[in-house]
Amino acid sequence: MQKTTDQDLEFVVHTIAGTAVANEREFCDLDAVVGDGDFGYSLARGFEIVLADWETFDRATPAAFLKKVALVISLRVGGTSGPLWGTAFLRAAAALGGRTDLTGRDAVAMLRAAAEGIKTRGRSDLGDKTLLDALIPMTDALEQAVDAGGPRSADPAALARTAASAARTAADATTSMQALRGRPSYTGERSIGSPDAGAVAVAVMAERVADTWPARP
Amino acid sequence: MQKTTDQDLEFVVHTIAGTAVANEREFCDLDAVVGDGDFGYSLARGFEIVLADWETFDRATPAAFLKKVALVISLRVGGTSGPLWGTAFLRAAAALGGRTDLTGRDAVAMLRAAAEGIKTRGRSDLGDKTLLDALIPMTDALEQAVDAGGPRSADPAALARTAASAARTAADATTSMQALRGRPSYTGERSIGSPDAGAVAVAVMAERVADTWPARP
Amino acid sequence: MKKFVNDPKNFVPEMLRGLALANPDTLTYEPRHNLIMRAGAPRPDKVSVVQGSGSGHEPAHVMCVGKGMLDAACPGDVFSAPPADYVYETVKLVASPRGVLLLVNNYTGDRMAFEMAEELAQADDVEVRTLYVDDDVSVQDSTYTVGRRGVAGNFFVMKAVGAAAERGAGLDEVHRIGEKVNSVTRTMGMALTACTPPAKGSPLFELPDDEIEMGVGIHGEPGRKREKLQSADEMVAELVTAVVDDLPYASGDGVALMVNGLGGTPISELYLVHGLAHQQLTERGIDIHRSYVGEYCTSLDMAGASITLVRLDDEIESLLTDPAETPIRVF
Amino acid sequence: MKKFVNDPKNFVPEMLRGLALANPDTLTYEPRHNLIMRAGAPRPDKVSVVQGSGSGHEPAHVMCVGKGMLDAACPGDVFSAPPADYVYETVKLVASPRGVLLLVNNYTGDRMAFEMAEELAQADDVEVRTLYVDDDVSVQDSTYTVGRRGVAGNFFVMKAVGAAAERGAGLDEVHRIGEKVNSVTRTMGMALTACTPPAKGSPLFELPDDEIEMGVGIHGEPGRKREKLQSADEMVAELVTAVVDDLPYASGDGVALMVNGLGGTPISELYLVHGLAHQQLTERGIDIHRSYVGEYCTSLDMAGASITLVRLDDEIESLLTDPAETPIRVF
Ligand SMILES: Nc1ncnc2c1ncn2[C@@H]1O[C@H](COP(=O)(O)OP(=O)(O)O)[C@@H](O)[C@H]1O
Ligand SMILES: Nc1ncnc2c1ncn2[C@@H]1O[C@H](COP(=O)(O)OP(=O)(O)O)[C@@H](O)[C@H]1O
Ligand SMILES: [Mg+2]
Ligand SMILES: [Mg+2]
Ligand SMILES: [Mg+2]
Ligand SMILES: [Mg+2]
């Protein structure tokens, strides 16, 4: 199994941050349908700081790096997203421990830990119509592909594409769900008929990672 | 010269009152262009009371009758219109003195006195873009027709039509004027381009009198 | 029309009834003449202060009745001066042996109603004086109009006059103070949207999404000119400049600064405007002693704001500092 | 977007700066963490009371800082819970030896930020307790959500808790009072229009001219259901019924009644609503001891209103009656 380098981890985090900043309005509009329209704004303000502070982050280990990112997000981002995304990055960091040479399995472990962290912080689970409904199916698909072995499992670009496709399908599928957590849940059945903003954001970020993987530095 | 009876005076006042009530919205809309949109409302609320109290008014003389109408309007109608229209009716009453058999000349005298009263109360004059700019030309036209003698001057229906036409022409002509008094004057040159609400009301009332004269009781 | 309203003809009486029910110990509502009185008025030891005007400017003036402010307010219908009769009845009800001061915003309709009422009351031997408020700087050329309008600056006249009356000043003195405050008070307003009178049921004018009305009064009429929507900084600069240049207010002047909301603008924006105005005035060397931010004199649900300055001296400042208790300011 | 705004990202800081400039003697603004503090806080002899939440609800909560109310408010951006860091810094700044009470409206984001801050502060040996306000009756089924939302009823919790702290009560006692007030407070709101967050620049949803949103919170989201616009009488009846049936409030209960404007509805309409609500409650035998009419907790420029009831006992009524001085209530 080919190893991903820390460079790849940095690339993924940088892409997530850039995507959040670039899609501020789209993510706000998604949140405006049955939420309060600030999701894109909150994410963008946080990941803006991540990008601004990028060069200053501790890079002793991948985990140390992720922890710094997590701290910026969880302490400096408002709304529900700050604590949730901050926790996600923090748990991903913890899942790595001291390891430096990261593999596809590490990616799965990080995503799994992130999802578990969000579940705990948000008192939420799969099926509540949140970003978990994109994050968990995406992680499942990635894990399957990694476990399957074979040439595709060894190609990070192919793995990224697999993850992105799964995330998109799952995010689209949130449209027919009723929100049981977060602000949209206050509208009851009216939350059915539009996708969850957080889930779509996960899909857009995963797609961006897959799209730009071949051209990464 | 044929005499108009008190019945005719009552008919004219009743028609004015009825027209004010029936055109509440139109008169408000006219006032909304560069004013505050309450002209029709104020007039309607006052003339509504005039109609409701109609049977109770003193009818000892035409002047006494007009005075009662004036009192209701000037004390019970708000806005600029209450004092202005109240004064107009009061001055019209005063112009009649104790006379009972009214002529075309009396009509002219009443309208003239009403206009003078409005000028004094409102510190306004012809050319200020107010109801005076319909009332005074209408009075002039009526006076000319009455003075001219001949068969038309002896026919009250024809006189009413003459007055109505003059009022309409004059009211339409206020469109190109700039308001120098009343609320529209605060907008300066922007008052040019729409007719004065008060002037149009005078025209509409005069037209209604002319239209229904033949069928009056 | 998106409003809380039953029959629009009952809009004002229903509002006044709600106001009286909310303040049972301090206010009385007299439905026959549409008036709100301070409980216990008139007091024989105190000049009574009355303000009337059209409705739609709330909290002005019915919600300014109370200790240290008005003894009564006689509102007309929305944007319509009260009938003279109502003013006359109000004056009779609050007639104090020390006299009655009538505060009137300078509009033709209001002037006429109050003049008629004053004549009627004087015939009854009530001592009455009338004071006209005309703080609006947007009406430039007074030879072509009935003069300047009274707008949000009337708050300061009410407050100073109310405090003086509460302290026991006589009618002449109270009148002098009112004239003085009015003479050093200037206001300029602007609208982001039109307002909707309940009886009309639709906005008084159409304003595109990127345009504003500069130089508006408080009756929902269009302003002096229509302009493009700009940044808060730029719009505030236009208001501040119009006010400052008018009196003019000069470097070294101590002032009260009011940022008044016209009804539809939230208080968050008003405080933002206040911060910008404060900075611009400070840069001009004008010293802000007191700030007033909120809704003082509105145009129904119009979005927009006005800026008022009062040049302070010790007497005015002390009167503004006196306590007052009104429905909008009591816990 | 028709608003007074410069760069939308600076909307909240510019508002806070304007607020502090308007109240130089009583408030301090700490730009680094976006917080408004009472001058002189913390007082060693007094529990400090802090409320945080998203912005856009003004006067809640930054304009409720002052004597007898809050010692500090830490607002987030518009409709966004403050970052945990800001809450933590606020707690440190007002840490009194008698402890700190955190008031939080019950939303996921706010809960999480305050939980994190509480943990951090406790690690610093600051005595902290947290109280969640959840008065909104429109959120019916709490098993499917994080529970009820905190809306305008939070005013009464702030007021009672602030008065108790001012009187010198200890942290447990202040917390007990807050819990009690919250347990007898219920609110129901409705929107006539959507609101426009400065950063979004357009209304959060489209509402046709003849429709309303019933059961809205304070973040501009759609409500529980969309209904046809009705007369004020009918809409007030729907709000009153939802509130009364929930606790429920019974004939003979003495209550405080609040009619809260959501930002775009003028106070004239709020008093009209108050009159109707007062009558409907009186017909049910409910006794209104105190009335609160105005803007207490808004959704930016949303037109609409909420109705809140608090069931009073002697303790609560006495605390509500205590004086308080905040930016919005001082002359
Ligand atoms: N309890 C929760 N658990 C997991 N995810 C949640 C939870 N609540 C909200 N979310 C996610 O967060 C997104 C909204 O984020 P944001 O707009 O920052 O929150 P808010 O404005 O409601 O505070 C939702 O679309 C959803 O994906
Ligand atoms: N000073 C004045 N003299 C004569 N007529 C006037 C004067 N001011 C206003 N008007 C007339 O009154 C009309 C407006 O009446 P109304 O709406 O009741 O007044 P407002 O709302 O301005 O108090 C104007 O269209 C004009 O015809
Ligand atoms: Mg949101
Ligand atoms: Mg008018
Ligand atoms: Mg008017
Ligand atoms: Mg939010």
Image (tube, coloured by chain):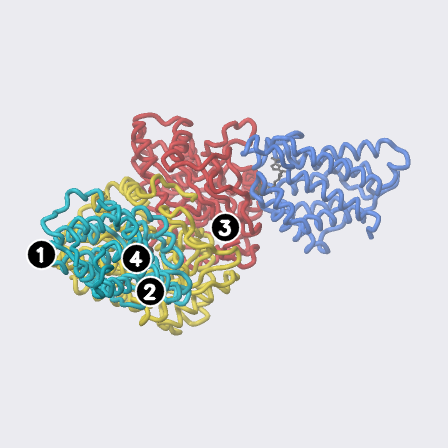
Chain colours: A cyan, B blue, C red, D yellow
- Residue A129 is labelled as 2
Query: Which quarter of the figure is the C terminus of chain C placed in?
Result: bottom left
Number of other residues with Cα within 10 Å of mark 3, as a class: few under 14, some 14 to 19, many 20 or more: some
Residue D233: % across, % down: 50, 63
Q: Residue at x 72, y 45 (%)?
A: B66
Number of other residues with Cα within 10 Å of mark 1, as a class: few under 14, some 14 to 19, many 20 or more: few
Q: Are marks 2 and 1 on the same chain?
A: yes
Q: Earlier in the sequence, mark 2 or mark 1?
A: 1
What residue is shown with label 1?
A98
Q: Is residue B157 left or right of residue B125?
A: right
Residue A120 in sight here: no
Q: Mark 4 to mark 1: distance in Å? A: 28 Å
Chain of the residue displaying label 1: A
In the image, residue C210 above or below residue D171: above
Number of other residues with Cα within 10 Å of mark 4, as a class: few under 14, some 14 to 19, many 20 or more: many
- Residue A164 is labelled as 4
Query: Is there a contact, CB below 8 Å, between mark 3 and mark 1?
Result: no
What residue is shown with label 3?
C93
The amino acid beneath tag 3 is: Leu
